[in-house]
Amino acid sequence: MKMILDFLKPYRRLCVFTVLVMVLDVAGGLFVPKLTADMINIGVADGKMDYIIGRGAAMLAVTLISGAGALAGSWLCADLSAKLGKDMRNAVYEKSLTFSEYDFSRFGTGSMITRTLNDINIVQQSVVWCIQMVLPVPAACVMGVAMAFAIDTVMGYVLIGVTLLIIVLAVFVTRRASEIFGRLQRLLDRMNVVLRENLTGVRVVRAFRKEKSEEKRLRKSFEEYAETSIRANLLFAGLESTAFFVINLCITAILWVGGDRVGAGYMEIGDITALTEYSILILFYIIMAQMVIILLPRAAVCSRRIREVLEREPEITDPEMREHGCGAEDGAVVQFCDVSFRFPDADAYALSGLDFICRKKETTAVIGGTGSGKSTLAKLLLRFHDVTEGSVKVNGRDVREMTQEELRERIAYVPQKAWLFSGTIAENLLDGNEHAGEEEMRHALAVAQADFVSSLANGLDAHVSQGGRNFSGGQRQRLSIARALMKQADLYIFDDSFSALDFRTDAALRNALKTEVADAAVLIIAQRVSTIRNADCIIVLDEGRVAGIGRHEELMESCGVYRDIVRSQMKGGGENVGN
């Protein structure tokens, strides 16, 4: 609740004005029965047509004012809901941008989508319904009961008794609903995860003929969600039936007790009409409030899930005091100083004792077997993770003493999985340099050997689907490389970015890169020896440790791990190793 109030603070005046408009609507609805009773008691009873017309005109005016209040209140609530949803979604999204991979994995992609869309929708609805249906209830009860007491004390107590009965029922149902809605949101998370897995992994499902088992898994998650939803709807059905029963019981009590009071001379016949209208309006608002209150446990669960995201302290944070280093030594752009790294909750180190330098105008390569920590090394450079021991320095400064924006501004990165955003090729290239012109984009594409773009119907404006799925793996890699080359950086990292290229394209691309990034440091992470053979320095990783450092010829003599890698690739096509 506190979190929601914090988001509503900028809109305090709008909230207050909306509530006042809704109370005006309630007051109008309660004032009409009084006019009706006076019309019956005086105008009809005494045959005063002028009085009837006057009261009728007053009723029409009050109805118009009340209707205008209802329309204005609905419009203001919709406006407030849209602003609240916008602010909450922006806050969740901006917070997610500060998360490291470990932080994000604590929630999961499916859960983050649910929290950003479904959970915030429910909070929006609950806020609007509370303003429209819950906050006016105290005003409706106080004014309605006060008017009932003004007519007759006994009838006022009847209304109080019925109101308390409904409130007790609401408290009981709300407690029961809290547990059900909490389970409902968890099942919705699970359903999203399973559905997303099946949609993204549809080819794997078909390849292994797992349609039946996946269908069974999906059906199970859907059925669990459906069963819990049915239990929640049963609460609504039970509450609605009970509420209508209480309303009819109240009307019966008013007619029964009211008839006796009229016969005794304490009331007039028109007062029964007014009291009936008061009871119906009061109970209507209370019942509508109950419907909303039943949903509040679900909104509370959603609010708590959103708060978990907003209050999570990111694993990676920018320093409060920015310190300037003394500059890189001997042209060193990157220095790994006795670096060790262990993933959170892991027992073993993923990387241990890394100590090497990447220098300007040189190409440094990293090679090793699967799971040796090659990509993790790149993520430490980009500060997607912080080192456990030692330090990583860029241009002589520890990356932990730099802001993430400043650090990544100095690095151009091509990820292991070539990912393109939906839009056009030009829009993807502009992610590397938003001020670049067409000539610069075509130059970057030429260096990246992405000549296929010129043969497309729309060229740079060719459509790119989400993830670049309308291009082959090699085309996606070359477009990702071109995007990185659009940026003027101190360090270019190619994380296994040539794996989908044929050997000829690989060689042509590496030759073009020598000229294009000649003044920067280049770090190539690869599994093919042919890709890194001519590097100025090759680092061989084996189970997270450095097994050897040197040039190709040196490592062939001194490093058994490197020799094994070369020989294994020669068996599958040794003529390509020397390219």
Image (spheres, rainbow, N blue to C red):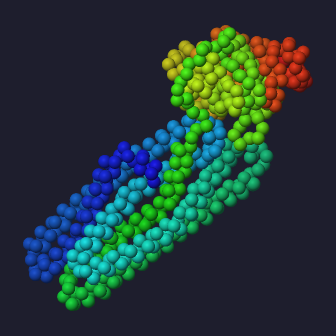
Residue 65 vertical position relative to residue 487 in the rendered view, above or below: below
Does residue 105 appear left or right of residue 23 in this picture? Answer: right
Q: Residue at x 60, y 48 (%)?
A: 111
Q: Nearer the viewer, residue 451 or 393?
A: 393
Residue 203 sits in quarter:
top right
Q: Position of residue 305 (x, y in %)?
A: 55, 51
Q: Residue at x 68, y 25 (%)?
A: 391
Does residue 508 appear left or right of residue 578 in this picture? Answer: left
Q: Residue at x 32, y 77 (%)?
A: 159
Residue 469 vertical position relative to residue 345 in the rendered view, above or below: above
Residue 372 sits in quarter:
top right
Please state, as top left, top right, bottom left or bottom right, where the N terminus lies in the image. Answer: bottom left
Please state, as top left, top right, bottom left or bottom right, where the C terminus lies in the image. Answer: top right
Q: Position of residue 454 (x, y in %)?
A: 61, 19
* Total labels drawn: 0
Q: Residue at x 31, y 87 (%)?
A: 256
Q: Nearer the viewer, residue 330 or 419?
A: 330
Residue 460 visible within the image: no
Residue 423 vertical position relative to residue 158 in the rendered view, above or below: above
Q: Nearer the viewer, residue 271 or 437?
A: 271
Q: Position of residue 259 (x, y in %)?
A: 26, 87
Residue 390 sits in quarter:
top right
Residue 268 visible within the image: yes
Q: Position of residue 474 (x, y in %)?
A: 71, 26
